[in-house]
Image: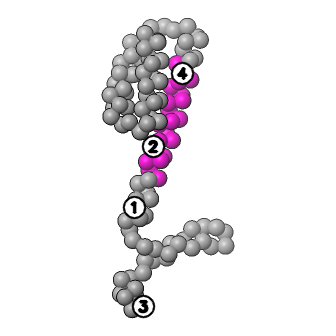
Amino acid sequence: MSVFLEDLLDQTRDAVLAGDIASLARLAPQVEAVVNGLPQLDAKTAEGLREKAKRNVKLIKAASRGVRAAQARMVEITSGPTLTTYDALGRKKAIAPLSQLAARRF
């Protein structure tokens, strides 16, 4: 059974790297079911599975950060043109968008 769990963890890794959300949705309940029915394992097998699970957690967290960054960027893009400047300390500051009337005058 641990070989099956190892295979599921590898499939999860592949799905995260490929951005295959449908596969992730299918794999999650399978992994949970196998983990809940897992018998006592020897230390070496348990550590191998733990490492694969940790790897997957890191990948999923990174993918989640990427999705949030893309969402924030889309909001930024769709909110219209703004002038962005930086102060002496390097902090980003957005200046209000130019009105359409000001753009027409030029």
Q: Amino acid at mark 4?
A: Arg
Disc 2 crowd, CA 10 A, few/some/many (<14, 14-19, 20+): few
The image quadrant where one finds the N terminus is top left
Q: Are marks 3 and 4 in contact (CB under 8 Å)?
A: no
Residue 41, above or below 29? above
User: Looking at numbered disc 1 in the image, what kind of residue is underneath it?
Assistant: Val
Q: Earlier in the sequence, mark 2 or mark 1?
A: 2
Give x and y (percent) for residue 86: 60, 71
Q: Which residues are magenta?
A: 49-69
Residue 75's label in the rendered image is: 1
Q: Quadrant of residue 39?
A: top left
Q: Is residue 14 left or right of residue 88?
A: left
Rounded to the nearest whole Å, what is the CA distance between mark 3 and mark 2?
43 Å
Q: Which residue is mark 3?
A: 106
Q: Nearer the viewer, residue 57 or 81?
A: 81
**Amino acid type of disc 2?**
Ser
* Residue 64 in the image, given as x and y percentages of width and height: 45, 43
